Image (cartoon, helix red, strand yellow):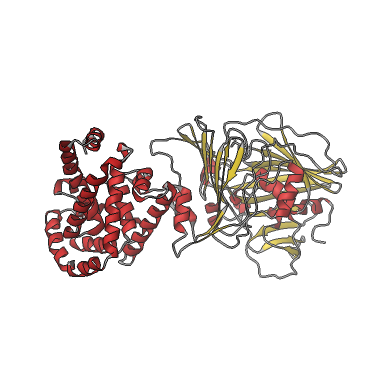
């Protein structure tokens, strides 16, 4: 259509017959291509086009927004086609005209044999024919005519969100039909290109046809909702009410029975720190939490934080199984650290129990900002969205999604443009995604030394699994590996056995998907141990103090590196020991000390894990007794 088609429509609306004839002539060709892609039948296409043009001429005066002419006209044609399929005449004609269709179709395809193979064209054609009319319509308008979702929504008489969902379902329906002929997931775009060339108005148009990848993408929430109609996923709206997002600044405190009296120092927002939930600068927030092994395992995170209308404030976070990305100001930073909240409050998860969130609120001073969902099992995805308008928080109900691997879906991928500047801030060990560590210290008058392996990402944890080995001066050894958490005497015999991961509690666990500051505090909350959080004077380190009875565990955590640097132990205010952590950037040289613990078949009774309080038991000489 010429650039001045709006002026042509305006004149035609006012009764200018010459303009109306010109408009009909221009609209006929574009409308014919659109309808043919829905029907693949020349005679039916001509019939629908003619009826649509007549309807256009009859009701053109009712068109109020001339810039939406094409979506309006496509809507007329689509409705005509729907009515056609609902009549007995259309059903009989569809069967009778099938053979007639093949001849014209072969003639149209004759000049395109150099573009695609006959067999492939037949498969794609058959797959498209099996789609519902609305599915074909949304694919044609979006992929071939480049119409926006808003324009398609106008054409189809539904909301923009419904149009996005319909587009997702249409793509999945087409992919399903293609898969029946042996085509994999990556064949969808190729099939759309083939179909576009087959149905192009000329060989020249077919040769020039391309479909941008962006045209096949859809918004995240719509993608998830559309996925609900497939057999590979189950989506339920969790009936948990609105998500209340607190706006108060954190004033971390300990209960009156705690032994920490100094008030906390609240961090200021920095370039690597995400805006906290509920902060005025984040008027629109979306969070996607994916738990590949269930709510008690690692979590992947995607977050979008947008400022109020009229502001340019925008930040996106993607913490997948390989790296931590932060998109802001047309630049993507790949960082060592996971996201933390700038008010130093604990990152809540929608799968947290009410008891957990209530306990956390007692000790970080932040109101419960995420209502719990009840989803369990592997492959769980939870979506939370909230928006602040006129001082009121409006939130959609959280969705829970069951899916085999959300990380492979386009709605959990980065959606920043290809030309975005990438800045890799990772050090060597974080870029490698795992490293070895050494531990040195002294607890209750006894020297302690150890080593271990720490994966920084979930993907790395599958190949370079975490393990820990600590040896005390008296010969006692603590091992946490594939055989579980075991206490061994000087002869190597097991004296106590705990669930795997027990001695990794309260230690670095970045592969779990949360900042170590949060994993430590959540480990404390699981044992109902009080805690407080303070930003240290250098602005980079944070101190987390965990209190259990008379014992205090004081963690020094590097926020940027996302690592524990030191753990100090106090007993009734008196120093009881410390552990210092060293992480290997370079893995060259002798690494014999880092032999992973071997699996053992030795069996002892399994004791209940005390979580991070195993450090308290070690200091008190009670571990394994």
Q: Nearer the viewer, residue 141 or 479?
A: 141
Q: Is residue 13 left or right of residue 301?
A: left
Tell me where residue 597 appears, x and y as whole percent.
Answer: 64, 59
Tell me where residue 40 appears, x and y as whole percent.
Answer: 21, 59
Tell me where residue 59 appears, x and y as whole percent.
Answer: 27, 45
The image quadrant where one finds the C terminus is bottom right
Residue 491's place in the image compared with 434, above or below, is below
Q: Is residue 373 left or right of residue 528?
A: left
Q: What is the quadrant of residue 579 in the picture?
A: top right
Q: Is residue 283 visible?
A: yes
- The residue at the point 58 percent across, 33 percent down is 281
The image quadrant where one finds the N terminus is top left
- The residue at the point 24 percent across, 35 percent down is 14
Residue 208's place in the image compared with 402, above or below, is above
Q: Is residue 576 left or right of residue 455?
A: right
Q: Nearer the viewer, residue 401 or 417?
A: 401
- The residue at the point 71 percent across, 37 percent down is 250
Q: What is the quadrant of residue 389 in the picture?
A: top right
Question: Exactly how many numbered labels are in the figure?
Answer: 0
Residue 234's place in the image compared with 217, above or below, is below
Q: Is residue 554 visible?
A: no
Q: Is residue 281 left or right of residue 534?
A: left
Q: Nearer the viewer, residue 318 or 557?
A: 318
Tell me where residue 15 appears, x and y as whole percent.
Answer: 21, 37
- The residue at the point 71 percent across, 57 percent down is 502
Q: Nearer the viewer, residue 513 or 149?
A: 149
């Amino acid at each position: 259509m010429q650039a001045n088609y709006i002026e042509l429509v305006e004149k035609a609306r006012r009764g200018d017959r010459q303009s109306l004839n010109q408009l009909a002539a221009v609209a006929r060709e574009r409308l014919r291509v659109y309808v043919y892609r829905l029907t693949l039948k020349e005679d039916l296409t001509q019939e629908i086009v003619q009826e649509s043009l007549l309807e256009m001429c009859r009701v053109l005066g009712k068109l109020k927004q001339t810039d939406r002419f094409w979506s309006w006209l496509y809507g007329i044609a689509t409705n005509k086609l729907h009515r056609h399929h609902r009549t007995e005449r259309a059903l009989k004609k569809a069967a009778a005209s099938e053979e007639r269709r093949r001849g014209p179709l072969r003639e149209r395809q004759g000049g395109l044999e150099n573009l695609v193979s006959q067999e492939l064209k037949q498969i794609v054609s058959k797959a498209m024919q099996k789609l519902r009319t609305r599915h074909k319509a949304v694919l044609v308008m979006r992929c071939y005519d480049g119409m926006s979702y808003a324009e398609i929504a106008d054409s189809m008489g539904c909301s923009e969100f419904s149009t996005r969902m319909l587009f997702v379902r249409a793509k999945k329906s087409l992919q399903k039909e293609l898969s029946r002929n042996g085509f994999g997931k990556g064949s969808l775009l190729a099939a759309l290109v083939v179909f576009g060339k087959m149905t192009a108005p000329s060989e020249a148009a077919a040769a020039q046809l391309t479909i941008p990848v962006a045209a096949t993408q859809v918004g995240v929430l719509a993608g998830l909702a559309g996925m609900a109609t497939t057999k590979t996923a189950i989506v339920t709206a969790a009936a948990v009410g609105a998500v209340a997002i607190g706006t108060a600044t954190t004033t971390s405190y300990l209960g009156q029975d705690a032994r920490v009296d100094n008030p906390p120092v609240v961090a200021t927002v920095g370039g690597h720190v995400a805006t906290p939930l509920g902060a005025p600068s984040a008027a629109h927030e979306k969070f996607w939490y994916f738990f590949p092994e269930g709510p008690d395992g690692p979590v992947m995170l995607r977050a979008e934080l947008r400022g109020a209308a009229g502001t340019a404030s925008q930040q996106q976070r993607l913490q997948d199984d390989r790296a931590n990305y932060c998109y802001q100001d047309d630049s993507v930073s790949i960082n060592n650290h996971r996201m933390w909240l700038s008010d130093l409050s604990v990152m809540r998860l929608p799968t947290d129990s009410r008891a957990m969130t209530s306990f956390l609120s007692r000790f970080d001073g932040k109101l419960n900002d995420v209502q719990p969902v009840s989803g369990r099992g592997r492959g769980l995805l939870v979506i939370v969205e909230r928006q602040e308008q006129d001082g009121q928080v409006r939130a959609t109900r959280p969705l829970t999604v069951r899916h085999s691997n959300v990380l492979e879906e386009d709605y959990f991928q980065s959606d920043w443009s290809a030309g975005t500047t990438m800045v890799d801030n990772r050090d060597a060990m974080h870029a490698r995604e795992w490293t070895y560590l050494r531990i040195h210290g002294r607890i209750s008058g006894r020297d302690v030394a150890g080593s271990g392996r720490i994966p920084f990402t979930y993907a790395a944890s599958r190949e370079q699994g975490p393990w820990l080995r600590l040896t005390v001066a008296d010969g006692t050894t603590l091992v946490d590996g594939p055989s579980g958490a075991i206490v061994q005497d000087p002869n190597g015999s097991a004296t106590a056995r705990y669930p795997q991961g027990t001695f990794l509690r309260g230690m670095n666990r970045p592969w779990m998907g949360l900042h170590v500051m949060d994993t430590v505090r959540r480990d404390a909350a699981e044992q109902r141990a009080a805690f407080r959080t303070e930003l240290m004077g250098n602005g980079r380190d944070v101190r987390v103090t965990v209190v259990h009875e008379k014992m205090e565990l004081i963690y020094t955590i590097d926020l940027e590196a996302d690592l524990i640097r030191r753990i100090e132990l106090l007993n009734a205010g008196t120093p009881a020991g410390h552990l210092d952590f060293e992480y290997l950037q370079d893995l060259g040289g002798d690494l014999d000390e880092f032999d992973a613990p071997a699996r053992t078949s030795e069996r002892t009774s399994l004791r209940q894990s005390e979580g991070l309080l195993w450090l308290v038991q070690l200091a008190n000489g009670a571990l394994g007794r």
